[in-house]
Each structure stands twice: as C-alpha cells, then as structure tokens.
Image (tube, grey):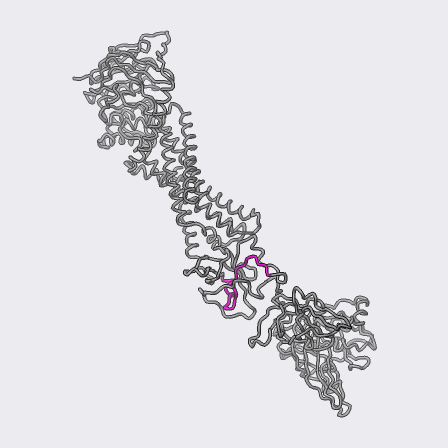
Amino acid sequence: MHRLRYLIGLCTLIAAALGALWIVRLLRHADERPGLPLTLEWRDAQGLRAGTDVRYRGVTVGSVRSVAISADGSKAVAQLRLDPSGAGHARVNSSFWIVRPRFRGLTAGASGLDTLVRDPYVAFFTPAERGSALAPGSLLTGSERPPAGSDPEALGDVQHGDLLMTLLVPENHGLKAGSAVIYRGMQTGEVRSVALAPSGTHVEVALRIERRHRQTVTDRSRFWVARPHVSGALLSGFTISDVSALLTPYVSYIGEPGQGVFVQDGFRAAAEAERPDLDVAAVPAAAVAAATAPEASPAPADEVVLVRITYAATERDTLSSDDELLRHGTGVLFVDRAGRAVVVTARALVDGAYTEHDFWWGDPEIVDEQLKVLLPDGTVLRAGRVWVDPEGANLAALVLDGARPDLTGTPSHRIGRPTELPEEAPRCLRAAGPDGGTMPEQELQPGASASAELLGAAVVHDGKLLGLWTFLPGGEGGAVVSLDRLPDDLRPR
Amino acid sequence: MDPALQLRGFGLAHRRSGAEEVLLEHVDLELRQGGFFVFVGTSGGGKSSLLRVLAGLTESREPPPRMTGELVVFGEDLASGRASLPQGSVAAVLQDEGLLDELSPRQNVELALTAAGRSRKLAPALLAQAGIPAPPGRIAQLSGGMRKRVAVARALASSPRLLLCDEPTAGLDPAAARDVARVLRAAHDQQPQRTTIVITHDVDAFDGLSDGVLVLDRAARSLRLEQPAWRPAPSTATDPSPRETPELAAAHGIRRWLLQAAAISETVLDSLRRLPPVELGLAARTAARFVLEPALFVAAAGAVIGGLATFFALRNNPIEGGFETALLTGAGKVSAAVLVPMLSGFFFTARVAAGAAARIGTMKRTQQIAALRMMGIRPADYLLTPLVWGMVLATPIVTLGGVVAAALASAFAAQLASGTSAASWATAYFAAVEPRDALVVLAKATLSGYLVALACYHLGTGPKRSGAEVGAAVDAAIVVGMAFVLAVHAVLTFVVYA
C-alpha cells in the first residue's frame, strides 16, 4: 500500500515536471511555432498587453507576445505573432493599429467601443490591392489610428456580380470608406476607399454597387458628391438639395431608364463638380400599370438560360443630327461545340444596320456599337456579333468576351422546333429582366405585342425552347424564329 | 564494594496543581551491586516514579518530582538534581516496551548497539540470549512475551550496570512470565557487577531467582528490603491515599508555563543545533515520503483551485468576454504567487503534518521516545532533524507541483471557457509572473515547512498519558501548522508585494 502511494506520488511529480516543461517550452519557444513574427512600433501602446489578440476583419489571427519600450525610450515596441491562417493577410501595405475606444466626431461616430469592456488589441487592415507578403521579423510602424477603409462595419463584403468601379471626383467632400452610394434616394452601394490620384489632379473613389442595382449604372449615368446645395434665384425662390448629406456626405448618381449601356467592372466615370440641375422623372405609367396588374406566375426553374442584352450605337445621318440607338432585350445563352459562350437573339436587337435605313443612301452608317450582356449571376460581359442570318432572318449570334470556363448555358436537349407542336399548343414568352434574372412568363397570344422588352424573348413550351420572339422595332406584331437556322458550329453542344 | 543504590533520608513527592503528593519519606536503604531485586508495592505507590528517576526519564515539560535526602546511584546523588549517570550505565525495560514500530525487532536491537558504540553483529546473540533467536520481521507480529524479550535484548545492548525493568511479566500467563523472569536472571548473571531491579506484582514468577525483595509500603511511605522468600500478606484493607501537602497553585502554574517556554526554546534550538542530520538515511527517507505521499493530494487540490479560478473568472465574467487577458494575467499572478502556494501549504499541513504529529505522539504515548532516550539517542536527532529536513525539502517541491497543476488546469479551463489557445493563455497567465515570485514562493514554502515541522515535533513530544492526548496533539499540530502557513504567507506576501 505504501509502495502504491509512493508510486502514485512519483507519477504525480513526474507529470507535474512534464507539465512545467511544457509551460516553459510554451513560453520560451512560442516564437518557434509556425506563424509570422512581426515587430510593431507605436508612439503610444495605449495600454496594450501581452497576450491580447491580433485581429483581421474581427477574427483572431494571432497574439501580442510582448510589449516593451524601445531602447531610446521614444516608442512602444510590441512583438506580434500571426498564426499561419492570418499570416497570409498581412502584407507590406497592411496597416496595424491598436483598437481602443475612439470618437471621431458626429459624422464618423465612435469605434473600438468593445475595448471599453475588454483589453485593447491590435487589428490590421489590408487594402484590396494587396502588396507583397511580409517577411518574418519585419519591423513595421503601426498606425496611431485606424486607417481609412478599415472599419469593417462600414464595408459590406463584395459579392459575385457586384459592380466595382472608380469614380473620379475633383475634390473629396468628406467621403470615406463606407460612405453610401445613393440612387433615387436609395442606397445601392458604398464607397470602398478614397485615395488621392498619383498625379494629384483629382480624387479616386472606389465604389461598389450591389448586384441587384448594377443595372442602374450605365455609361450615361451622372455622378456627384452629395452635399447641401442651394440653387435658385431671389425671385424664383431657393431650393436646398442633398440636405441629408450635411452630416454624412455620400455619392449620388442618376440616369434615366433606357439610356446608356451597362458597364463592366473597372468602369471609370468622372463625377460632376456640382450637383447637376435635373429633375427626377415621375414614375412611368407602365410601372403603375405593372403594379396594379395581376401577379404573374413565377419564372419556371428549368435549364433555359436567358441573358439581358444592351445594344448601343450611333447612326450617322448626312443631313441631320446623328441618332443614338439604345436597345434592351433578351437572348438565350448556351455553350457552343467549340466551348464558347454564345448568345442567340433577335438581329433587330443587336444590329442597327438591320433596322435603320438612311433616306438618302439606303444603307445606314452605324458607328460606336456597344454590346453588353448581363448574365443571371450579375456579371456584365462585352459581346461580339459573330453571325447574322445570311438569308435576312431576324436572328443573330453573339460570342461573349471573358466568360468563365464553367459557365452554364442552355443544354441542347432543351432546344426544340416550332413545327413539332400543333398550332393550338400553348406557348410562353420568357424574357430577362433588368437585373439579369428571368421575368415571369407570359402566354404568347396570336398577334402578341411588340413590346421592346420582349425583343429576343424565348418562346417556350413545356420547358423546351422553340425559338425567339422577334419583330422589328416600331413594327407591329412579331414572329417566332427557330434556332434551326443557326450554323452547326454555333449550335449548343 | 560500593553499593549500587543508597537512599539516605530520601523523600519523593509529585508536584501537582495546588498540592504535593508525598510518595516516600525518610527512606534509608542500601542495595549492593550485583544483586537481582524484585520491587513490589501497591499500584500508585511510586515504584514507576522511582524507576523513572533512576533511569533519568522524568518528563522535562512538567515540574519534576520533589526529592529530599540522598539518592546515590554508583556514587552519584541524583536527588541533588545536578548529577547524572554515565551514558549506558543504566538501562530500562519499560512497561510498554517502547519498541520502535518502524524498525524490525532486530533493527531495534541494532539501533541500541549502535547507540552504545557496540557492533551491530551482536544483535542476534542478544536476541538469542533473550530467548527469541529468530524474531519475526515486524514489531506488530510479536506476541506480548516476545515483545518483552526483544525489549530485554535491546536493554542489554548497552551492557548496563543497572538494569531496571517495569512490569516485565505484566499481561503474561504464568509460564510465559516465568520464562521472562528466567531470561532476566540469565541476563543478569551474564555480568557479575550488574544490578537488576524488577518492578512486578507477580512475585511468584521470580521465586528462587531474586536476591531480595524491595517493598514499598504506601501507607508508611517507606521502602525496605526483605528476604527473597518474602511474600506480601493478604490484606482486605484499602490502601490509604498518599498524603498531600498544599502548594500554591499560581506557583505551580508559573512553573509549568516557564517549563513550556523552555521546551519551545529547546525545540527551536535543537532544530538548529541538530540540523546536520545524524541519521542521514532517515532524513532522506522522510523527505522522500513527505514529497511522495501528499503529491497527488496537493496537485489535485491545486488543479481544482487553478481550474475553477480561471473557469469562473472567464465564464462568470460580469463584463462578458471583456478583459480576458487581464483576467488571465490576474488569475495567473494570484494563483502562482499567492493563492495556490498558500493553499498547497494548508493541504500539505493537513496531509503530512497531521500524520507526523500523530506518529510522534504515538511514539511518546507508547514510550518509544523514552526508549530512545534510554538508548542514548537524542529524540531530536531521530525525530526532529529528519522532520525538519523532510518538510523543508518537501514543502517547496509539493507546492511547486500544486502551482504547476493549477497552471495546467487553468490552461484547460481557459480553452473550455473562452477557447483561448495554449500560447495565448501562457503569455497572459505568466505575463505578470516574475522570477522573484518563484523565489518568494520557495521562501514561503521553506519557512512554513520548517515551522510546521517544529510544531509537529513539539506538540507530538509533549506529555502523553492517553490516546486522547495524542488526538489533541494532532489537532493542535494541524491548527498551529496552518496558522504558521497562513502567517508566513501573509507576512511575506505583504512585505514583498505591498
């Protein structure tokens, strides 16, 4: 019994000794663990303690190993260690700062309030344009305050399909990361970052427009930095606009529906120096009618993939001013046998030369053609017109530029022939909406309308694509054009 | 030839609170050297008291018996209070034998031989002479008669000139009693100059073996020598109570208090004077035992304290999720430097000091300590020095074990309560812990261990007339030991950190 007791005691002491060794090793060799050791310098450690977190986007990715005063006493020096999971996010252009309660005025509000009830900790922010990776042991100068664009609460995550563009403004009137982007009084996006142009001639503001609102931005949209603006005259009275920007400036833009072409990511636009003097148009009667119309049936979830097409061009006239062409319609997306992303649509939608006619010379002069395709996932791609029906049928094919290899199109087994159906069989029209999504189906009636929104719409029966709904702009009535007219190399695989 | 024992006008009285109990008065008596005497008398008459005076076994922490006249043993007057007999000249077989339980019968004899400066190889011969040539391995395996024989063998180890035996046949059947009597006579005859005095109520067991009978007459408070054939006359009269003479109670109390103070001083001085271990092996074994026995107990206690402190600090944090690093740092500092060392000291005292005090108290109660003194072994060398070394070495080790266990439990609790990684926990937990803290912890543990050892020894070696007094000594050792731990930790913590 004594021996057993002594054995248990011995085992306990050995376990305690091993535990002590583990702790000593943990403390002494903590720096040898995988991860990225960094040295940060601040003018003031602001109560930072060893053992507190290092966070990136609110996630703990490391810890503060020690906090000390530099040899000359001029700085506070902190040793940090980032875990392997967080080391990749720390770049040469990352900004490290100590999170503590900060009040930055009425417009910017307070930040770091969580450190009222917890220890100050270190956070870092890496801009979207990531620099090269940091070397282990790098000595960095920490920011004394959070850098612009670092407030995680102000920036939403970029979703696939969001429009990322740059606005060039002559002067930044208080814009910062997180400032709102407003369209018709509704927030459609946010400012991602604000930076002075390298040339110093203007300020570059990175914007993110949410996918569901990206169709509101066209190459005709007009942007400005909203701030209180007084207009009018003594006799006619004054108007004060954008009063809401008194405390928090924001970016606003406007564009009339049906004007301009969708823009792609990377689009750059110059903001107006002042708020443009314009009146917002009333709600269109069509919208009112649509709002009072009986609710249409939801779009079926089959494999027919529709896209929204925007065509813009200029017709040069000889004796009159040029005509601007802008059309929106629908096309059917599929992947052809060569693996290209092909959109088939009405030729009247994508070829100005097909619809326009010069009074004097017959053939119109069409210039500055633009073809943009809005995919269901919100992506906007440029397109090229690669084929038109040689026999003059209202059918054309576009090839998308820069489509993802894994793009899903309409499969070949979904494509049928109009002749396979009896004349009285019901057919439905299916069109792409302004946001790229499929609009509710509507039944195809004999002598159906030639609504511009339906140009190129898919004619569907029982989940099979029978053809495209085509007509000539300004004409009356339409017709179904079969996809049988497509050459073999442009057919779906 | 000088007599072995001379009493001239000798008187003996016990000092008690408020009175003196007179046992002997005006005794004149001579006992020749080489005689084998049987000492009889009614119980409580003073036989054992006289034997303790002769053996030098009076209790140092109580007022000694008052002696008058002369009590000359081998030319030294013990009644004067200044004389002492040469080491080894007197040996006693005590009523409870006083065999050291932790040693084997043979080792008991060997220890006595070593203390007397004789060869340990003589032990088998002495045991054979006492009629127990092949004793069992443990004291607990001995019968009553065998215990007496081992005690006799051990008493003969120093080859004493005066052999005193207190009730050597008590509790034995007549045959066994006769055997023991023969053994004593045979041992007596081994050395012609040896004088043997045997206290007994069983005169018949020594029939034909004694050279005379010392009769203590309780009524007359006298002592006389009778012929070997003397037998006590049957009497129905009750023994009169010993005569009592008044003594000032206050004086008795002051005397006892002074004796206690002197005993404490003696314990402290002994602990320092006798610090170099004479019994090196015993000190090492004691230290190892004190380290190993409470290690799991203290580690478990430390783990519970450290784990719960961290867990509840983080989980029941009134500022939910706030200041976790600060909480861990505070918990680490207070656990590693103050709380766990102090509580480890408490647990160590409760676990080890109680056992040590109980062991020493039992040794005192069963006259093992008296036996040590009879063998010429200082109890401080045999008990105090190993105890001090054991506790001084074991307390810091066990305390560090508790601190480590608390830290490991804290790491686990931090992971459990807030998902803190081991590296972050270690950085925060030990952020405020400095090397100085380890030194202070070691100092506190060492000093408290030393004081606890003194308390155990001092309280354990106090007078023990009953098992209840042993229990009281254990209680006192725990309370005093914990008070020492508390005081040392509080004072040193305050002095260093305040």
User: What residue sits 47% from the left and 60% below the top?
Assistant: A80
Q: Position of residue B8 (x, y in %)?
A: 23, 13
In this view, the residue farthest toward the front is: A234
Which quadrant: the C terminus of chain B?
Answer: top left
Residue B209 seen: no
- Residue A140's place in the image compared with B278, above or below, is below
**Direction from residue B7 to residue A28 in the image, left or right:** right
Which quadrant: the N terminus of chain B?
Answer: top left
Q: Which residues are magenta?
A: A84-104
Which is more toward the observer, A268 or B151? A268
Which is more toward the observer, B331 or B388? B331
Q: Position of residue A60 (x, y in %)?
A: 53, 58
Corner quadrant of residue A173 = bottom right
**Direction from residue A162 to residue B253 in the image, left or right:** left
- Residue A422's place in the image compared with B489, above or below, is below
- Residue A211's place in the image compared with A417, above or below, is above
Q: Position of residue A406 (x, y in %)?
A: 62, 72
In this view, the residue farthest toward the left is: B1
Q: Is residue B77 magenta?
A: no
Q: Position of residue A362 (x, y in %)?
A: 76, 91
